């Protein structure tokens, strides 16, 4: 059975039930309660969440698209096992794309209010999974207005995988306090409409995390 009972009771409307299942399973993966490689059986998850299999099935489809679970024929759904090579590839892609997306977005009027609110949630978070998701929301708020749907789509597709890499890396190297200071500097540059500085600080921020990933060894 699954340890997913720490979240609130499931809402009644089907879309809300799907969102509830998605948020609960995602938090379970990022917190480590649902371990890498662990099978995820629809009927068992549905029983734990007190809902039918349909919203669970839809949630698992979304998680597959975001890269947090894998579906293998004749085996079923399992929590993704993120290797160090996977994590490095994710952050290398972010390093190539995100600084430019942030620069373009700040030039066009990034959502500073949303970015500031995300940093506040990260600061108030009591669990690594919550902190990592809030940090991803911060970055997304700053690159979302880049006015390039392909660029934004690639970065959006990496959000959950980046969160998983961050949580597992923090377990070895609790660097999130330093990263919080870097986030504050990026936000200040965006608030000042200094697109080039925001991009440069974003580049340094991601490069620093990538260095820690490469030095960590093992899985990330």
Image (spheres, rainbow, N blue to C red):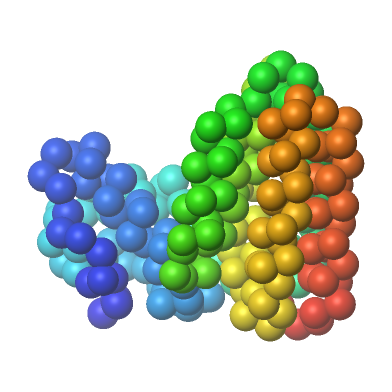
Which quadrant, please, contains the N terminus?
bottom left
The residue at 66%/34% (across/down) is 142
The residue at 59%/63% (across/down) is 164
* Residue 13 place in picture, x, y as percent: 14, 39
**33 left or right of 165 in image:** left
Whether 136 is drawn above or below 44: the answer is above
Whether 126 is drawn above or below 91: the answer is below
> Which of 53/7 is in front?
7
Which quadrant, please, contains the C terminus?
bottom right
**145 left or right of 126 in image:** right
* Residue 206 place in picture, x, y as percent: 80, 54
* Residue 70 place in picture, x, y as percent: 52, 60
**186 left or right of 25 in image:** right
Whether 56 is drawn above or below 211: the answer is above
The residue at 86%/77% (across/down) is 215
> Which of 69/182 is in front?
182
The image shows a total of numbered marks equal to 0
Say whether residue 154 is visible. no
* Residue 210 place in picture, x, y as percent: 83, 62
**163 left or right of 18 in image:** right
Whether 145 is drawn above or below 17: the answer is above
Say whether residue 7 is visible. yes
The residue at 27%/51% (across/down) is 20
Kindly indicate the quadrant of the structure image that contains residue 139: top right
């Amino acid at each position: 059975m699954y340890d997913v009972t720490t979240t609130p009771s499931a809402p009644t409307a089907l879309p809300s039930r799907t969102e509830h299942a998605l948020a609960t399973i995602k938090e379970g993966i990022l917190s480590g309660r649902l371990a890498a490689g662990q099978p995820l059986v629809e009927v068992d998850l549905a029983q734990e969440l007190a809902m039918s299999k349909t919203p669970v099935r839809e949630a698992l489809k979304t998680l597959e698209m975001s890269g947090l679970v894998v579906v293998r024929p004749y085996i079923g759904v399992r929590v993704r096992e993120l290797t160090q090579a996977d994590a490095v590839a994710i952050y290398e892609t972010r390093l190539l794309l995100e600084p430019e997306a942030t620069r373009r977005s700040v030039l066009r009027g990034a959502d500073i209010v949303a970015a500031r609110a995300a940093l506040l949630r990260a600061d108030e978070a009591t669990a690594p999974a919550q902190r990592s998701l809030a940090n991803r929301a911060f970055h997304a708020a700053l690159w979302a207005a880049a006015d390039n749907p392909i660029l934004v789509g690639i970065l959006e597709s990496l959000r959950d995988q980046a969160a998983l890499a961050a949580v597992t890396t923090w377990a070895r190297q609790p660097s999130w306090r330093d990263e919080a200071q870097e986030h504050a500097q990026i936000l200040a540059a965006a608030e000042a409409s200094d697109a080039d500085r925001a991009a440069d600080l974003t580049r340094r921020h991601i490069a620093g995390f990538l260095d820690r990933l490469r030095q960590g060894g093992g899985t990330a």
